[in-house]
Image: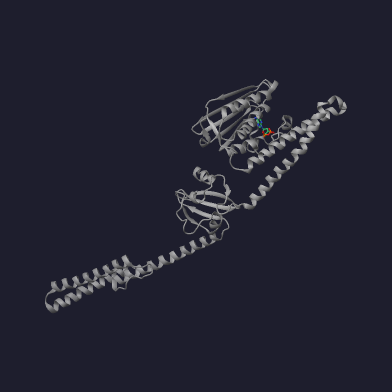
Amino acid sequence: MNQNWHGTLIRHLLLLVSASLLAGLVSGHYGGCLAIGLGLYLAWTLKQLLRLHEWLRHHTPDEPPPDGYGLWGDVFDSIYHLQRRDQRVRGRLQAVIDRVQESTAALRDAVIMLDSEGNLEWWNRAAETLLGLKTPQDSGQPVTNLVRHPRFKEYFEQANYAEPLEIPSPASDRMRIQMLITRYGNNEHLMLVRDVTRLHQLEQMRKDFVANVSHELRTPLTVICGYLETLLDNVEEVNPRWSRALQQMQQQGERMQTLLNDLLLLAKLEATDYPSDNHPVAIAPLLKSITHDAQALSGSKNQQITLAIEDEVSLKGSEAELRSAFSNLIFNAVKYTPADGTIRIRWWADGRGAHLSVQDSGIGIDTKHIPRLTERFYRVDSSRASNTGGTGLGLAIVKHVLLRHRGALEINSVLGKGSLFICNFAPAQMTKP
Ligand code: ADP
């Protein structure tokens, strides 16, 4: 191509010079004719340059460059080929984009692209059904304006997307959606939303079933325990052979009652996402009262139970729920620490929030059990739990109460050395008494 261009240019210049010299020979003015020839060539070149400039400025994407002759014809041809190649590449890319958009549009899950500020950039059709987004009005709107659930706002602003979030759909109260956010590129977000109504209904059925069974069992059990108590109150009138059996029946009856109460409490905790109250709860007197009960539970075990209140901060939430969680942790420490052991309870606040730690010098827990401890009915050793009268629901209750109070449970333990349970509450949950 380059060779061609040079050849054409040299041929044209030679032709021009020869024509000018010929005109000079005829007229006798060599210099003048050469100057006129070169001037004409320059004017023609300038004209082509102006045509190119005009085309570059005003052409539509499909308009070919102007026709030309000689060297300029080659230049215009090359531009035309570049333009065609570019059109073909663009066409192929558009086809890929169209296919990706078509396939994501056909997805039953919603896909939403957000910019670094959290504004809506693009979404598929399912997003309109699951989140009620409107095309194109909602484009550029902040996602938190359109999904207004308080938990979503908190989840989005916290920017910790390790766990998915489940909330009712803004499009319909009867629909339940699960959201998963991933960050990519320049802090842009990709949001995936699934319809989990069916799963949620099944889960709800399970919870309702457990709550109903527990509730139904409570009345007959109260009657049985009541009669057993009456019989044991008049134990001298009962055949001595039955007295031990009756005592055991009463013990097991009481265990069943605690179990049912714990199951009902868990069902109540699972029914909503937030604590039943949102008053400031003074933690210091609450811990003092639980420590007092713990001393009574410890009884003759001669355990040393200490309470250190380092900050007088209160927590927003429900006193009954917090009492239940804290007493579960503190009573566990008493139950799982042998005689003469120590139990240290500490309440303090710092930049990361408020914290309660319960440390004991008890039997400890093997590391492999720690991740599963907060599961319902999970016990490290079932024989050990039945000795202590535990239900296996205590730590599940603690976990749920903490979740509802923007808190998390941290467990550290060394087998044979003791355990440390820490409840960490977010600064937003703290309040002054
Ligand atoms: P339980 O009612 O059986 O105590 P929890 O849910 O409260 O049930 O605790 C689950 C299990 O975790 C217990 O069975 C026990 O084995 C273990 N555990 C809880 N707290 C402690 C502790 N302070 N020290 C040692 N083991 C503990």
Q: Which quadrant is the N terminus positioned in?
A: bottom left
Q: Which of 150 and 101 is in front in this view?
A: 150
Res 397 quadrant in image: top right
Q: Position of residue 317 (x, y in %)?
A: 57, 36
Can you say whether 51 is above or below 299 in the image? below
Q: Can you see residue 37?
A: yes
Residue in the image at 19% along x and 76% along y: 19
Q: Where is residue 348 in the image (x, y as percent from the top left)?
A: 53, 28
Q: Where is residue 8 in the image (x, y as percent from the top left)?
A: 28, 71
Instruction: Classify the position of ligand 1 by quadrant: top left, top right, bottom left or bottom right.
Output: top right
Residue in the image at 18% along x and 75% along y: 20
Q: For the image shown, how many numbered marks are present on the structure?
A: 0
Colour scheme of the rendered structure = one colour
The residue positioned farthest toward the bottom in the image shown: 26
Res 278 quadrant in image: top right
Q: Which of 249 and 187 is in front in this view?
A: 249
Q: Where is residue 40 in the image (x, y as percent from the top left)?
A: 20, 72
Can you say whether 216 is above or below 280 in the image? below
Q: Nearer the viewer, residue 133 or 412?
A: 133
Q: Can you see residue 378?
A: no
Residue in the image at 15% along x and 74% along y: 33
The residue positioned farthest toward the left in the image shown: 28
